[in-house]
Amino acid sequence: MSKSDRLLQCMQALRTMPAPVKATDLAAQTEVSLRTTYRDIDSLRKAGAMIDGEAGYGYTLIEDPALPPMMFTVDEIEALVLGLKEVQSIADPVLASAAKNVLSKVAAGLPKDLQNQLMHSVLHVKNFSTRPDIKIDIADLRKQTRAENELSIEYSDAAGVNTTRTILPLSIVYMDGKLMVISFCNLRNDFRAFRVDRVASFRATGKSFKPRRVAMLRDAIRAVTNGSA
């Protein structure tokens, strides 16, 4: 990891971890020695970050120069909190962690009074439904979808019949408490919505369908909305 990447990771840890953050925890987060962590804190301070504390007591990020001040109305803050907490509630661990990081970055860029509004929002999310067990790497599925790569999947349908499908993944959608991958199915020569929890495995075939995804997705959404997928 380069020094610049490590400093960014150190700043993010200071934003998200409960203050004061111990140097040992920062070292573990960035996978460096304590001595390097102390040097990184000094580098961040020289770059303009206002970090209170010292070795043995922990560190608190007082002001973050990396993020410009942002102004939101109270309702806009509540909308941000609700949306990001919803992602943390229903998404896979990688996306949930990303939502937590976004919330901390937004908080760091707000004036102090709006920071308090965000941290003490009256809105919360509670998901009472049981999340289906997902066997595959959702983060990799998102990556392959963004890259517009054709995939071969091992899939079990509602009747428990196992098939191998070759699909063009277009979008990953949360519908009725289930995670679905909206795709063009080469076997059916039509758009289909596959439940992600029924995908046993997948691999990229090495074929790309760029730059067709955006146009195909519009047609796929129309098909799913009409109940034909």
Image (cartoon, rainbow, N blue to C red):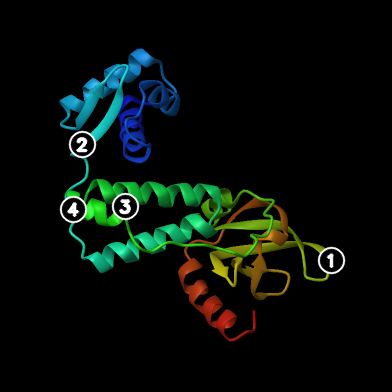
Graded by Cα atoms within 10 Å as few (under 14), some (14 to 19) or many (20 or more), the crowding at tag 3 reads few
Graded by Cα atoms within 10 Å as few (under 14), some (14 to 19) or many (20 or more), the crowding at tag 2 reads few
Secondary structure category for the residue under label 1: loop
- Residue depicted at 47% across the width and 64% down the height: 211
**Which label belongs to residue 113?**
4
Pointers 1 and 2 in contact (CB under 8 A)? no
Q: Label 1 to label 4, Cα distance in Å?
A: 56 Å
The answer to whether residue 212 of the structure is visible from this angle is no
- Residue depicted at 51% across the width and 62% down the height: 126
Q: Label 3 to label 2, Cα distance in Å?
A: 15 Å
For residue 178, above or below residue 24 = below
Pointers 4 and 2 in contact (CB under 8 A)? no
Q: Label 4 to label 2, Cα distance in Å?
A: 14 Å
Secondary structure category for the residue under label 4: helix
Q: Quadrant of residue 24?
A: top left
Label 2 sits on residue: 62
Percent of width and height locating residue 218: 48, 76
The N terminus - image quarter: top left
Which numbered mark, 1 or 2, is in the foreground of this view?
2
